[in-house]
Amino acid sequence: MKTLTTGQLAKETGVNIETIRYYERCGLIPEPPRKVSGYRKFSPKYIERIFFIKRAQALGFTLKEIFDLLAVADGKPACKNIRKFAEDKVADIETRMHDLQKMKMVLKDLIKKCLGKRKISECPIIESLSQKRNRHKE
Amino acid sequence: MKTLTTGQLAKETGVNIETIRYYERCGLIPEPPRKVSGYRKFSPKYIERIFFIKRAQALGFTLKEIFDLLAVADGKPACKNIRKFAEDKVADIETRMHDLQKMKMVLKDLIKKCLGKRKISECPIIESLSQKRNRHKE
DNA sequence: TTTGACTCTGTACTAAAGTACGGGGTTATA
DNA sequence: TATAACCCCGTACTTTAGTACAGAGTCAAA
């Protein structure tokens, strides 16, 4: 099967070559097999894995969280833990979506006002997102 | 009107006192008036502003982006810029929500499978989020 | 077969977002 | 009026997520 060098994987995924090695060090991607020379041989699956990491990051997950997510994807921990983890993540996602929805509405409102050339006096951005809430730490 | 010291504001918002000073240095909160002694006097509005920063951060915005968001809230830049900025942010938010929705569905699916005690063989987490897409850099 | 492009490792550096600390002044309360 | 608890400033340290670099080996195409 066709394999990629580190540089090719980097180019393919648009990340820095050093980042690939960094992810390997962090355990975000498994250690790939090597040629006798020591060169890494990445299967095409690695491309998807890198994309996954990048998109999850764009969603605001830390590398640690992505590590856990990938452990789930890899079927690593016991089923019970997976379930708990997945449920927590779903709750977390719902909170995020809710907050994003709010911010979106406010911004759309702002655009409308802007269109109407009306002056923005008391902008509602802060009010919309600044209520106290039970902190969702993990 | 009642004002807060730095420590009180920190306690009220649940952030470290040093963080307050840090945010002031970064321009995320305006410089408050001082007592003759040099002690800061924060109006209660600062509480909301800190909460806003924290929640926006939880949504994955960087302090730089939050700075821009707050500039809009403060009515700083010209209306045209606000509009463009707000529209970009809305698009960004829509992408995030879309991706979060996907990840949520996958996790829920995972939970269902877990419930049924079935073994997770080929986890769909990666597949669901690893398609290439036109990168949305700013 | 040589030469330019690539890869290896290990170490060091960077930027962002805080946190901690030391030495000093201030405030509230016993 | 002391004294603990608080605040000031400046500087330095920490963590996360990479990046850069040096010195050495490898590969491929002319």
Image (spheres, coloured by chain):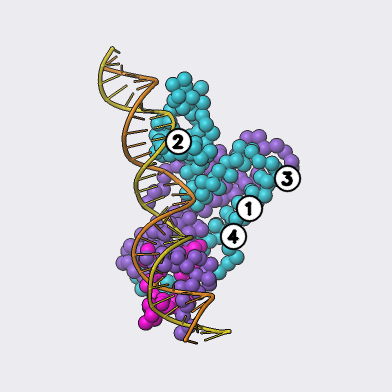
Chain colours: A cyan, B purple, C yellow, D orange
Residue B88 sits inside the magenta stretch: no
Residue carrying label 3: B115
| Mark 4, other Cα within 10 Å: few <14 / some 14–19 / many ≥20 | few
Name the residue at 51% across, 49% down: A62
Instruction: Give the mark toward the camera: 1 or 3.
Output: 1
The residue at which mark 4 appears reads as: A136
The residue sitting at 51% across, 40% down in the picture is A26
The x and y percentages for residue A16 are 39, 38
Judging from the image, mark 4 belongs to the subunit labelled: A
- Calculate the distance from the C-alpha at mark 1 to the C-alpha at mark 4: 10 Å
Q: Are marks 3 and 2 in contact (CB under 8 Å)?
A: no
How many other residues sit within 10 Å of disc 3, few (<14), some (14-19) or many (≥20)? few
Depth check: give the residue in front, B66 or C4: C4
Proximity of marks 1 and 4: CB atoms separated by less than 8 Å: no
Q: Mark 1 sits on what residue?
A: A88
The answer to which quarter of the image holds residue C3 is top left
Q: Is residue B28 left or right of residue A30?
A: left
- Specify which label sits upstream in the sequence, 2 or 1: 2
